[in-house]
Amino acid sequence: KKIQPKKESYVIASDSTFAPFEFQNADGKYEGIDVDLVNRIAELQDFNIEFKFIGFSSAVQAVESGQADAMIAGMTITDEREKSFDFSTPYFNSGIQIAVKKGNDSIHSYEDLKDKKVGAKIGTESADFLEANKDKYDYSIKYLDTTDALYSALEIGEIDAMMDDYPVIGYGVAQKQPLATPIPREEGGKYGFAVKKDKNPELIEMFNEGLAELKRTGEYDEIIGKYVKDGS
Ligand code: GLN
C-alpha cells in the first residue's frame, strides 16, 4: 500500500554516533541500520527526507519543538516517551547492559558498582536505569553528551563502568574496542521510529508500510546482516 506524503520533504533527526545504527564511515558519510532502513523506506514509499545527525537528546528536543518531523536513533519505545511521541511498529529488539574496560576484574554484579563512577549518555534509557537504581547500588553517575565521549571516558578511566544498548556495545567489541560485559543485560527494549504525538501520522504509516515490505522481501535481514555479523 502506497501512502500519500503531505510534505515536500521530511526532516529526520538522528543521533550523532550510535554504531551500528548511525555512524560516519571512512568517507565521512553517515550509514547504519537506521539510515539504511529510512532511506530504503523513503524510496519504496516515494517521499523525500533530509537527515540531521544532531545527537540523541537534541533529536528528542528537535521533534518535540517541531524543528524535525521525526526521529530514528535506536530510540527505545517507553511508556514515558509515548506520552509525547507516536512510535512506529518496533523495528529492532534491544536492551541495555553495563560495560567495563577489558581486563577490569573487579565488577561482576550491580553490587560491585558500589562507590564506583558509572557513565551514560544523557537522556537515554541507560541514564534512566542508572538514576532509578542509584540508591540501591550506591554508585555515582556521570552523564556524557555523546556515545563517543562515553566510550572514551571509560577507556581513559574517567569512569569505572558505563551503560549502553547492548547491540552498540556488541558492535564496539566486534570492532575490537577494549570492552567487557560482566553483568547480564536488561532485556526488553524495542526501537521505534518516532514523530511528535499527533503530528505527521502519514509518516508513521509510510514507515510501517515500508518496514513491512522490507521484511517481506528479506531486505530487512540484509540490512541488519550488513552491520551485525555474529548475532550480538
Ligand atoms: N535506546 C536508548 C534510548 O532510547 C539509547 C538511544 C541512543 O543512545 N541513541 O534511550
Image: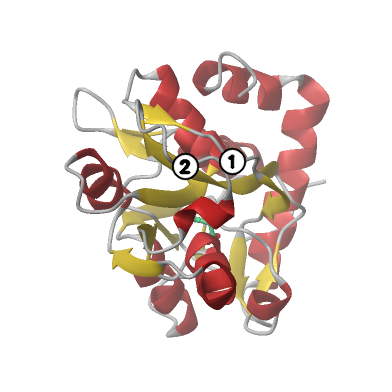
Q: Which residue is mark 1?
A: 183
Residue visible at 35% across and 27% down?
102
Left or right: 127 as drawn, with respect to 225: left
* Picture coordinates of residue 52, whole percent (x, y): 33, 57
Residue visible at 21% across and 43% down?
152
Q: Which residue is mark 2?
A: 107
SS category of the residue bearing label 1: loop
Kindly indicate the quadrant of the structure image that contains residue 115.
bottom left
Kindly indicate the quadrant of the structure image that contains residue 142.
bottom left
Q: Is residue 6 visible?
A: no
Amino acid type, label 2? Ile
Asked whether the residues under the numbered discs 1 and 2 touch, taking CB atoms below 8 Å apart as contact, a structural biologist would say yes
Give the number of marks: 2
* Picture coordinates of residue 77, whole percent (x, y): 68, 63
63 to 97, vertically: above or below: below
Q: Is residue 107 visible?
A: yes
SS category of the residue bearing label 2: loop
* Picture coordinates of residue 55, whole percent (x, y): 33, 60
Viewer-proximal residue, 226 or 195? Answer: 226
Left or right: 195 as drawn, with respect to 157: right
Residue situated furthest top in the rendering = 230
213 to 103, vertically: above or below: below
Amino acid type, label 1? Ile
